[in-house]
Amino acid sequence: MRAQPKASHFIDGEYVDDAAGTPFESIYPATGEVIARLHAATPAIVEKAIAAAKRAQPEWAAMSPTARGRILKRAAEIMRQRNRELSELETLDTGKPIQETIVADPTSGADSFEFFGGVAPAALNGDYIPLGGDFAYTKRVPLGVCVGIGAWNYPQQIACWKGAPALVAGNAMVFKPSENTPLGALKIAEILIEAGLPKGLFNVIQGDRSTGPLLVNHPDVAKVSLTGSVPTGKKVAGAAAAELKHVTMELGGKSPLVVFDDADLESAIGGAMLGNFYSTGQVCSNGTRVFVQRKIKEPFLARLKERTEAIVIGDPLDEATQLGPMVSAAQRDKVFSYIEKGKAEGARLVTGGGIPNNVSGEGTYIQPTVFADVTDGMTIAREEIFGPVMCVLDFDDEAEVIARANATEFGLSAGVFTADLTRAHRVADRLEAGTLWINTYNLCPVEIPFGGSKQSGFGRENSVAALNHYTELKTVYVGMGPVEAPY
């Protein structure tokens, strides 16, 4: 085992374990090697974590936003100093190539701590409302104990994206990573304590589908933030709504990426590849329905095939590797089943569709795959695959492609490639999605809000907007004169 933590959970500033919890293994997807053995949280562990958070939160909330932010910024510095170590752990946890994790995972988590640590003193202000002789004011107050439930594609980033705004706003958090990627969040918790975060404010517990309800339904939990699938989101949001808890849902997508015939071809292909193959296609915002205007369809496909087949697949710890394995055998099998459906329903396989011939048989690898001649009714065009499978669809004109792009239950993201910026803004305005890109794709700096619409969720991660989802407004009316009453 290469990444065995001191214990399975991190509660009240310390590693703890409970051998009564269901044992599970953390697998390195590139080789099938067991890199850690842990236990899922028992009800006693859940209670311990929530009790620690509830105890620590009031004193933390009484501190100034500046003081809270100072600790988060210190955590960001530590993460940057240990970027290599954290990136290697993220690669072992997820199978993503080190050339990717070293620039996109702990670094984006550090960005989140730094941003929220710096912006909170100004962003958490309220308003003064003059009312003649009287006046009122508002203030943003923390919610209390928040629960974060993470996905397996960006475990360290998600822990920070949820933890940073929650903490700087004065809340405490209990974070549950995916059982597929349990290791990174524990290191984030360690670093926060080292940076000076009081004990009990950021707790990490392991678990599976049976653990989530223990957190979501707990009476001391005020808010739940989930990154996950739409079916999971519906269950979690429904349970939270039954108790009127605050929720943020960052769910799945089947996002359109529209390429007009005047687009820069190389840039559009690069955007499509980033929006389908980065993180081995395991990104919720991916533009997996690539609509290409008919005039440039064949040149687009020819160059896309050439560039896709040049992708370097191999050992994720080798910095030359550009594409690693899927996170698990189950996920790879699911993606293969979609590839078979694509073939059976008449899509044209341009490239990929199998297992690379230069990798370990125990690794959960899959070739980057491109389908052409995809139609709107095909399964691969309607359902989220969550793997490196690109669907290329033809279109003729703007009105047509907007209608087809919007004909989905999802609304997470969308992209437009065109040299006509007037058209770019017009199309972006009409596409039904929460996050859009023009002449680029999948860039998510912490300064901008990220989130979806329709079945892709609600609420926002990142930017000042995220603080609104971890606080609530308190309004105070101040009477300055005698009270007149008709009684």
Image (spheres, helix red, strand yellow):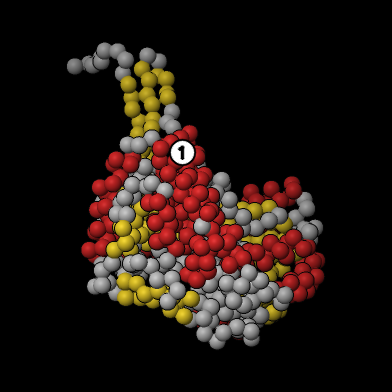
Q: Secondary structure at mark 1?
A: helix
20 relative to 32 in the view: left or right:
left
* Residue at x 46%, y 38% (from the top left corner): 120
The vertical placement of 125 against 57, above or below, is above
Quarter of the figure with the C terminus: top left
The vertical placement of 8 against 336, above or below, is above
Question: Amino acid type of disc 1?
Answer: Ala
The vertical placement of 251 against 333, above or below, is above
Q: Nearer the viewer, residue 385 or 327?
A: 327
292 relative to 482 in the view: left or right:
right
Q: Position of residue 446 (x, y in %)?
A: 55, 49
Q: Position of residue 177 (x, y in %)?
A: 40, 63
Judged from this view, the residue extending furthest toward the left is 487
In the figure, residue 358 lies in which quadrant? Answer: bottom right
Q: Nearer the viewer, residue 169 or 410?
A: 169
Q: Position of residue 35 (x, y in %)?
A: 43, 75
In the figure, residue 308 lies in which quadrant? Answer: bottom right
184 relative to 418 in the view: left or right:
left
Q: Nearer the viewer, residue 384 or 21?
A: 21
The vertical placement of 384 against 82, above or below, is below
> Can residue 60 be spotted in the picture?
yes
Q: Nearer the viewer, residue 351 or 446?
A: 446
Crowding at dot 1, Cα within 10 Å, few <14 / some 14-19 / many 20+, comes out as many
> Can residue 385 be spotted in the picture?
no
Q: Position of residue 297 (x, y in %)?
A: 77, 69
* Residue at x 40%, y 51% (from the top left corner): 194
Quarter of the figure with the N terminus: bottom left
487 relative to 368 in the view: left or right:
left
In the figure, residue 188 lies in which quadrant? Answer: bottom left
* Residue at x 25%, y 47% (from the top left corner): 55
Q: Badge 1 is on which residue? A: 120
